[in-house]
Image (cartoon, rainbow, N blue to C red):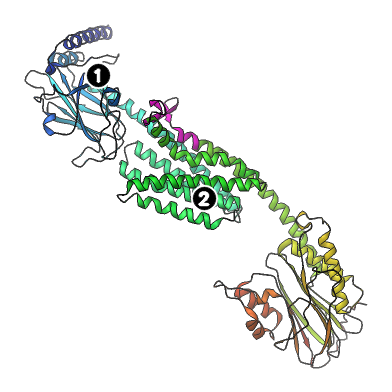
Amino acid sequence: MQDSSRWIFRWLVMLCALSLCHAGAQTPAPSTTVASAPINLRGVINLTGPWRFQIGDDPSWAQPGFDDSTWSVVDPSQPLTSQGFEPYTGYGWYRLHLSSAQVAAFGNSSTNAPLELLITGNAAGQLVVFANGVETGHTKGMTEHPVEYQSPPFDASLYAPDASGGRVLAIRTWAGPKDFIHRGLLVRVELGTRPEISDKLAESSATQWNEHATASIVVAFLFLCAAMLGAALFLAQRNHSEYLWLSLLCIAVSISGAVDACFGLDVLSFPAYQILSRFIGRIFMAVTLEFVLRFTASPYRKLVRGVQIAVLLLPFLALTPFDQIYDFLSVAIEIVFCSLTCVLLFLAWRKRRGDAGAMLLPFLLAATADSTDNVLTYAANKHWLPEQFESLRFHIGPVAFGPGTVSFSIFLISLVVVILYRFIRVSQDEQRSNAEVAAARSVQALLIPTQLPSTRNFMLESAYLPVNGVGGDFFQVLPLKDESLFIVVGDVSGKGLQAAMNSSTLVGAFRNELSHDPATVLEHLNRVLLGAVSAPGAVPELDAAPCFATCLCARVYPNGEMTIANAGHLGPYRDGREIELPPGLPLGVIADNRYEQITFQLNRGERLVFLSDGVVEATNEAGELFGFERTQQVSNEPARYIAQTAKRFGQTDDITVVSLYFSSRTVHKDNEEPAYSS
């Protein structure tokens, strides 16, 4: 019963207040200007005015006795530009007169509970409230030296009545000198008791979260999850650095979302937010270019590096007074960034990279996401679009978000889908490639000898170090019935699986060769290699692949006589000196090519070393070649020492070393006979 009486009494008082407001509106004198007061069930009045407004700043405008009759009458809920004002910068004042009857009537509605004001500002404008000349509340940045912050609603006390018991509200507003104010910095002023204003303030705080922070936090969290996914993919496939740059890209977006949320929650000032967002935005662009460069395997590295340097240097220009130059260059660099990103993806798509084509539209959206709001605001200010596009917002329930959030969300979804698809496809390709390499390694292990035959006259040793697990170098040593040795050393062009398969073809052909004449063997291997390359093979990557091979064939007799023929290979070293051989074309260049062979006489105690160009072409970190001089210095050392020395220097190609030592006396071994070839 008491609750019902209280509600009836409150409604009566509200009606009285409405009547007083209407009566006050009939009064012509400016000093008795009052506020029309639509009242809700909680007893909070929206003070719609009429308010008086003046551009400029003067401390006396806060005093209750100041005559504001010459000021313009405005409605804070409507843009100032639609009420006859030009856009302005800096300070502006609002004033409103409340009669003692209004204040007393509303105060009695809640048993004379203290009255408070709830002030709602606009954007990053700063406000300070005066009641009868006494400051009663202000935003965070409205200090002696004002700083722009996001302006959340705040409460201010209503006390210190004048002699008549009335109130004069004066609200001083400010925005930075670079901001042109169109709408006005005061949106709404509400009057109510302290509990009711506290409830409204809590609701306003929740609204601030939903309007300015929730969407940014959600986007930051989702991109952080995508960054963790990219890091996991990189750990799984270390040779695909695009996943690492994907992770860094997502981290940049996540940090940007966190910065947006901090500004929206009144944690960061607008100048600090502006600096951070500029640097983070440019870092995002540079990282995105690196990701696209590695994702597409584009050859335009120098062009991308130049754009990246320009992008990263641009924010420093914003710290200088050259604002117009920065604005112009900022637009130009964004156009270059968007164009270059799309061109790289388009070129990769033209090369039958479907995943690059799938990312083209999402990357275009992401590249323009930061600029979407600015473009819409600019178009609305130019009246090319309706005014509501100036701050275009969408809502899912109470959560508000802008076009940039939509663009980044589409970008994130497509990015994750394409990257996962690429990861699965690359994993399958690598599994298939590893199986092929393992098969090639097995074949090569059968064709490249790990143990060399022993003879009565010669001591043999070898070292074979492929650069990629399987290589294009090959060698064979065959003991013949007359106790001579037939040695073949060669190097197939290329590396990896393709070179290994071609070298295996040559070794197989050599083992099936009936002749043991060096020149004849080279001519036969030349025909075999030409035939293997011109006909499609079982491995797609090898079909019709251009290929050639250098090769050296030598037959060494028990008395030290050596017959040798060369097909473009390095000459052997004899006791530290290179043997000069007649030049010859590599295998696989010209059909029916003839090779010249010559004869040498080895002396007992001499060492003959055959090697591939992987020794001579070893390169250190400074770009210096191992070279012929160093090769000659180590050429009389054991085979393994020569190979390891070149590898430590900087291996860049397959390394093969075969060493033959002509014993100073014949070694007899009764229990160990060589396996001869006919």
| Circle 2/circle 1 CB separation < 8 Å | no
Crowding near the residue tagged with mark 2, few <14, some 14–19, many ≥20 C-alpha atoms within 10 Å: many
Residue under pointer 2: 289
Single out the mark in the foreground, 2 or 1.
Answer: 2
Residue 84 placed where, x, y %? Answer: 26, 24
Image quadrant where one finds the N terminus: top left
Residue 217 placed where, x, y %? Answer: 43, 37
Is residue 390 in the magenta section? yes
| Residue 582 located left or right of residue 329 | right
Foreground pick, 151 / 545: 545
Where is residue 86, by image quadrant? top left
CA distance separating discs 2 and 1? 52 Å
Let me know if residue 168 appears in the view.
yes
| Residue 555 located left or right of residue 238 | right
Where is residue 576, by image quadrant? bottom right
Foreground pick, 668 / 142: 142
| Amino acid type assigned to the residue bearing label 1 in the image | Thr
| Amino acid type assigned to the residue bearing label 2 in the image | Leu
Q: Earlier in the sequence, mark 2 or mark 1?
A: 1
Q: What secondary structure is found at the residue carrying circle 1?
A: loop
Where is residue 268, by image quadrant? top left
Residue under pointer 1: 48
Image quadrant where one finds the C terminus: bottom right
| Residue 233 located left or right of residue 378 | right
Q: Name the residue at the left extreme.
A: 163
Which stretch appears magenta? 381-407
| Residue 228 located left or right of residue 642 | left
Let me know if residue 451 appears in the view.
no
Residue 348 placed where, x, y %? Answer: 62, 48
